[in-house]
Image (spheres, grey):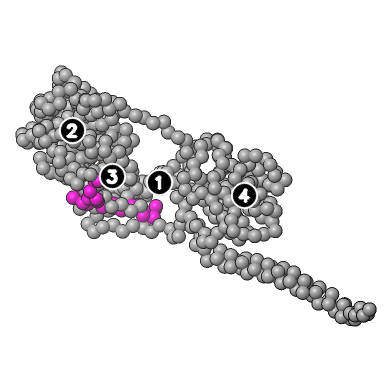
Amino acid sequence: MQAERKMPSFGRAGLILLLSMVIFSGMSYRWLSSYYMVEVEDKIEAQMKKWSPPTGQVKPPASCTCPAKSYDLAGSIPTANREDIQKRRAEEYKKHQARTSSILNTLLFAPSNSPLQYPIQGFTVRPLVPTLIPGLALHRVQRSSYKVSLQVTKGVLSLGSQSGAQSVEGVGKKLLVLEKLSLEELNKLLAKVTYTIPVYHIHTGDLVHFSFELHEAVFPIAIRQPTVPVLFDMGTKISDQVTVTTKTFLRYKQLKVLIRSLRQFYKDVVLIVADDSFTPEKITEENVLQYIMPGGQGWFAGRTLAVSQVTTKYFLWVDDDFLFTEKTKIEDLVEVMETTPELDVVGGSVTGNQFYFSIAYEEGDGVTGGCMDRKSNKKFQSLPNYPQCSIVNGVVNFFLARTDAVNRVRFDPKLKRVAHSEFFMDGLGQLMVASCGHVSIGHQPRGANAQYGRFRHPGKGDEQYKLQLHYYKNHLQCIHYG
């Protein structure tokens, strides 16, 4: 029997040593590789963080430039009162900004290659109501443990369920910290995070800072009290849909012609008349509602009164010396409005004059005031399905309008005789306006009316007052009529 060959003891020990070195080398390589990759990744993340644009506005707003031949509105203020008025205007503007500005207007940048998932738009909460923040998650990272934080300014953060509370800090506070060994468990916690604003506010917002290591994202929360719909029953007849409104002053002859022409085409449509004549004459026509005002209160005061009494979805504004014709198709204007629910006002033409204008407006730096340029006969784009209609900012003094929309803007009663464009200036950004050429109204022949003429044409004082009103009320430094 052949004797068994024995391995030298040195050889066996060497083999064990060699195998140990291989195993250790492999473990060391994996550990060093993992450590090195994490270190490199963190360095890259730090560099990307340094390159990321900051949140907030890139640069402060600059003062606007007034167009050539603009009215210098500050110059319309008497020198003796100018400093005091400027001071009061600045204080009032601060209050306006506090009322109308929002943290949701903050300029935010989405971080590139971020592992953070979060809602970027459409997340709205009701005041005082805890609401789950949808879509929170962490992705594409491997760590031995995971720690994220969320921080808000106005509200508080909590968890819908208190499971895993031992790895949570800051429940019910503005800073919430979550930590888990497992990515899956962390994401389960993130899916339970709620936001609550503890005070009642109907229209505001908050920003959430969502952080993981060197990654940070900021996303908005809109805080809104839902509004109650106010709907109008359109009925089946034009008289259920539209009220005609007008303002009269010392022109009863023209008013009666207007009423006769209206009744020729629309027997049952209600006409509301705001009357500030010094010696009122009672109108006894059927379906005519006459509201007597103190004498000489002015055009816009009369407009505001007339529109405030409208009960239909729409009102048609006409002057008291207009004339309804076969081309005055109220139904056609209603069709345009009903087909395009975004519209608030749609104008027609007066004896072929389809006057309309656009408004170029810059807010400026908030100190000197804004710049406004009214451009006559300038329009934007055609209205879909109605090539004879175009989007504009203001229209002629014959228009159909949504009653609730106009009541929100209102005709300023401070303007008595020099007024029309001013309503659309006040409504800029609030009213969607169109001008259509396929519906028109006539105009009565101009007759002599000496008493009316003395009040019809404004004096220099009226023009000066209007400029002063633009300076203070609209926070403008200049205005140009082109």
> Viewer-proximal residue, 129 or 2?
2
Q: Quadrant of the N terminus?
A: bottom right
Whether pointer 1 and pointer 2 mark residues with C-beta atoms closer than 8 Å, the reply is no
Q: Mark 4 belongs to which amino acid?
A: Asn
Q: Earlier in the sequence, mark 1 or mark 4?
A: 1
User: In this rendering, does residue 19 appear at all?
Assistant: yes
Asked whether 441 falls inside the magenta stretch, the response is no
Q: For label 4, count other residues whose C-alpha is less than 10 Å away and answer few (under 14), some (14-19) or many (20+).
A: some
Q: Earlier in the sequence, mark 3 or mark 1?
A: 1
Query: Element under label 2?
Result: helix
Q: For label 3, count other residues whose C-alpha is less than 10 Å away and answer few (under 14), some (14-19) or many (20+).
A: many
Residue occupied by mark 3: 425
Expressed as whole percent of the image width and height from the top left, the position of residue 434 reads 23, 43
The answer for how far apart the CA atoms under marks 3 and 1 are is 17 Å
The answer for how far apart the CA atoms under marks 2 and 3 are is 25 Å
Point out which mark residue 330 bears. Answer: 2
Q: For label 1, count other residues whose C-alpha is less than 10 Å away and answer few (under 14), some (14-19) or many (20+).
A: some
Q: Earlier in the sequence, mark 4 or mark 2?
A: 4
Q: Earlier in the sequence, mark 3 or mark 4?
A: 4
| Foreground: disc 3 or disc 1 | 3
Residue occupied by mark 1: 93
**Residue 282 occupies quadrant:** top left
Q: Is residue 323 above or below residue 103?
A: above
- Give the magenta-colored segment's residue range: 364-384
The answer for how far apart the CA atoms under marks 1 and 2 are is 41 Å
Q: For label 2, count other residues whose C-alpha is less than 10 Å away and answer few (under 14), some (14-19) or many (20+).
A: many
| Foreground: disc 4 or disc 2 | 4
Point out which mark residue 187 bears. Answer: 4
**Residue 463 occupies quadrant:** top left
